[in-house]
Amino acid sequence: MELSGDDLAGVVDTFGALTRDELARALAELAFKRGESADPDRFESVIDDAIDAYQLIRLTDSGEPLLAVGPTAFPTRPEGTTDLRHILDAEPRDIDRERAGDAATDRLREEATLAIQAGETDRVEELIDLSYDIETWSSADLSGVRSHLDESR
């Protein structure tokens, strides 16, 4: 089953946030409904890709690691997603958008530092673009990070 990061964001958005295991189970259920392989382990790389692309953001709620919709996602709900609420044993979660924005901002700052230290100019360019996405999506002001990235080019 081919799913994009936006599809994963749509599944997560159905619940507000999911643990990584819950998301893998949800994807396995969707695959099963389509008559495809339903092994949750096979979805690990597509989840990682969505996290890497900031389509999903990691955050913690009451000590529980969760995935929420990120700043570069345009959530789309794959066919059968609405049935997942009845199939999975996962309650909908309310995610504070500001906390999600803080998680994306913190991650961007860390990645900016690493990219500058490593002299990765292509990554610096990607992070500059990403900073605008995060600002549009949240209340963050990333002009300082952008300036630091600009200076490193």
Image (spheres, rainbow, N blue to C red):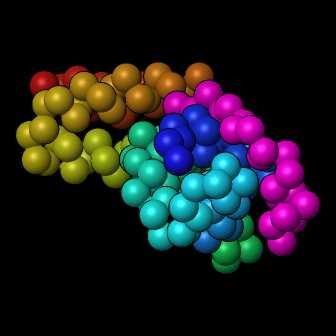
Residue at point 54%, 69% (across, down): 39
Task: Characterize the magenta stretch by its predominant secondary structure.
Answer: loop
**Residue 33 location (% of width, % of height):** 72, 54
Judged left or right of residue 150, residue 2 is right
Residue 142: percent from left, percent from top: 45, 30
Q: Please provide percent x and percent y for residue 121.
A: 13, 31
**Which residue is depicted at the point 61% across and 39% down?**
7
Q: For the view shown, which residue lies furthest in the bottom direction?
A: 63
Quadrant for the C terminus, please.
Answer: top left
User: Which contiguous range is marked in magenta?
Assistant: 72-98
In the figure, 8 relative to 65: above or below? above
Question: Compared to 151, does 98 lie above or below?
Answer: below
Q: Residue furthest left?
A: 119
The residue that appears at 53% across and 42% down in the rendered structure is: 3
* Vertical comparison of 105 with 44: above or below: above
In this rendered view, identify the residue nearer to me: 27 or 75.
27
Q: Which quadrant would residue 129 be assigned to in this image? A: top left
Location of residue 52 in the rendering, given as x and y in whole percent from the top left corner: 39, 47
Kindly indicate the quadrant of the structure image that contains residue 24.
bottom right
Residue 46 appears anywhere in the view: yes
Q: Is residue 10 left or right of residue 59?
A: right
